[in-house]
């Protein structure tokens, strides 16, 4: 059978619709009996007006029209179809019991017919011609779907290319600033300054080196995850020790913003199966993110919540908040929200994307809640609880 045969449709394909138009119910029943089969849905009309209503509501692969009907005959219906942009492409086969003289056929072809079938109908000829047009319809649909898929891929590639260019611009900016600070520090150290000045310079340079190392590590982690090269070292760990480690890591950023930090410790020992370092990284990234997007002197809270078979780690703040349209995108790579002063955010926009990927590797999930701009936000990580 040909590839487009309706009996070989895939489960995802919809039945192909064929319109049958005849003012006599017995003729419609006869056509239905000849053409009914799996993969074809026969749509029936007993008048030209009813057929037009169906054509405006249904997508059909073929229309079989009786020529001699009261009111709007088959030729008039065909002319209406050819004048309508939605259905002008539908092939028309006229079914006629009358004479098939040349003038009559010419009028039919002029109205848009592709063929005539004379009554009494030869079943094999009717089936063969119907299958040809059904197959042509399937081929057009396949081409249309492939075109839509190619368009979608092209749009995705264009968007990815734009994100890449934006990312490279941000990366260049983020790397340039600490490098310039380090170069300036080195030049100052070359001068014979006071010992106290040298100590202050070394401290500032150490902060920039730490910032650079975090940028590079984040970039490498994203690359490792994409390539499947991160393997977690899972062990049974006490959640509080992980949270304490994350607090120590992010404390300088929280203190630098003058934020009020509170930690609601778990009321019981909560154990999880996790990679200690990576889970600490998840929480510290969330805390650092909260500090970054909270105006100076804001409030940041870390909570551990026990469930029957899970634990939740919630990081909330009263910062800039996240608009509804951004809440579905904050975990996408290179996505950033503006800082409290409305300037573009520092960083590469990969912190939350990395958090989500690491949470996924731990068989957990993460969600964000925010009342919108200026209403703060809350990130909640849920992980399976270990016995």
Image: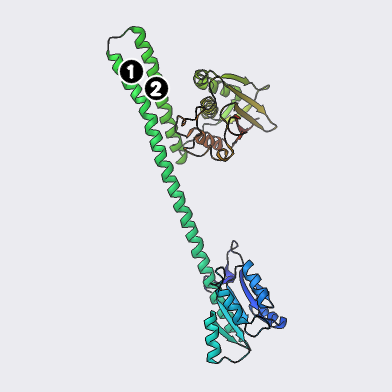
Q: Camera-side residue: 351 or 375?
A: 375
- The label number, if any, that marks residue 223 in the structure image: none
Q: Are marks 2 and 1 in contact (CB under 8 Å)?
A: yes
Specify which label sits upstream in the sequence, 2 or 1. Answer: 1
At which x and y percent is residue 119? 63, 88
Q: Is residue 333 left or right of residue 178?
A: right
At which x and y percent is residue 281? 51, 28
Q: Camera-side residue: 208 or 218?
A: 208
According to the picture, the residue beneath numbered tag 1 turns out to be: 185
- Is residue 362 positioned above or below 250 on the image? below
Q: Is residue 56 left or right of residue 168?
A: right
Q: In this orientation, does residue 38 appear?
A: no
At which x and y percent is residue 268? 68, 22
According to the picture, the residue beneath numbered tag 2 turns out to be: 208
Give the colour scheme of this rendering: rainbow
- Is residue 164 positioned above or below 338 on the image? below
- Is residue 161 positioned above or below 174 on the image? below
Q: Residue at x 70, y 80 (%)?
A: 29
Q: Secondary structure at mark 2?
A: helix
- CA distance for labels 2 and 1: 10 Å
Quadrant of res 118 = bottom right
Q: Is residue 63 left or right of residue 151?
A: right
């Amino acid at each position: 059978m040909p590839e487009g045969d309706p009996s070989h449709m895939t489960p995802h394909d919809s039945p192909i619709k064929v319109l049958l138009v005849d003012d006599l119910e017995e003729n419609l029943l006869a056509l239905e009996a000849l053409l009914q089969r799996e993969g074809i849905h026969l749509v029936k009309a007993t008048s030209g007006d009813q057929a037009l209503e169906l054509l405006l509501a249904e997508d059909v692969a073929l229309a079989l029209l009786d020529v001699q009907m009261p009111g709007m005959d088959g030729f008039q219906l065909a002319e209406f179809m050819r004048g309508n942009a939605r259905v002008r492409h539908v092939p028309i086969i006229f079914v006629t019991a009358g004479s098939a003289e040349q003038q009559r056929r010419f009028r039919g072809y002029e109205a848009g017919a592709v063929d005539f079938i004379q009554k009494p109908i030869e079943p094999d000829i009717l089936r063969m011609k119907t299958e040809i047009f059904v197959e042509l319809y399937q081929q057009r649909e396949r081409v249309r779907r492939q075109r839509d898929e190619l368009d979608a891929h092209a749009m995705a590639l264009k968007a990815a290319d734009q994100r890449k260019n934006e990312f490279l611009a941000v990366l260049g900016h983020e790397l340039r600033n600490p490098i310039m600070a380090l170069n300036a520090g080195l030049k100052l150290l070359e001068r014979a300054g006071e010992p106290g000045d040298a100590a202050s310079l070394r401290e500032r340079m150490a902060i920039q080196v730490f910032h650079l190392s975090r940028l590079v590590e984040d970039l490498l982690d994203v690359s490792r995850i994409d390539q499947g090269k991160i393997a977690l070292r899972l062990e049974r760990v006490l959640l509080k020790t992980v949270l304490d480690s994350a607090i120590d890591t992010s404390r300088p950023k929280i203190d630098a913003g003058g934020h009020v930090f509170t930690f609601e410790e778990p009321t019981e020992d909560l154990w999880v199966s996790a990679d200690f370092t990576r889970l600490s990284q998840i929480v510290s990234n969330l805390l650092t993110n909260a500090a970054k997007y909270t105006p100076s002197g804001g409030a940041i809270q870390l909570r551990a919540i026990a469930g029957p078979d899970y634990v939740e780690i919630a990081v909330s703040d009263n910062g800039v908040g996240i608009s509804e349209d951004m809440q579905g995108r904050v975990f996408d790579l290179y996505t950033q929200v503006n800082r409290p002063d409305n300037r573009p955010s520092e960083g590469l926009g990969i912190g939350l994307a990395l958090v989500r990927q690491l949470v996924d590797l731990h068989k957990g999930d993460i969600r964000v809640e925010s009342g919108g701009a200026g209403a703060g936000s809350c990130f909640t990580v849920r992980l399976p609880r270990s016995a």
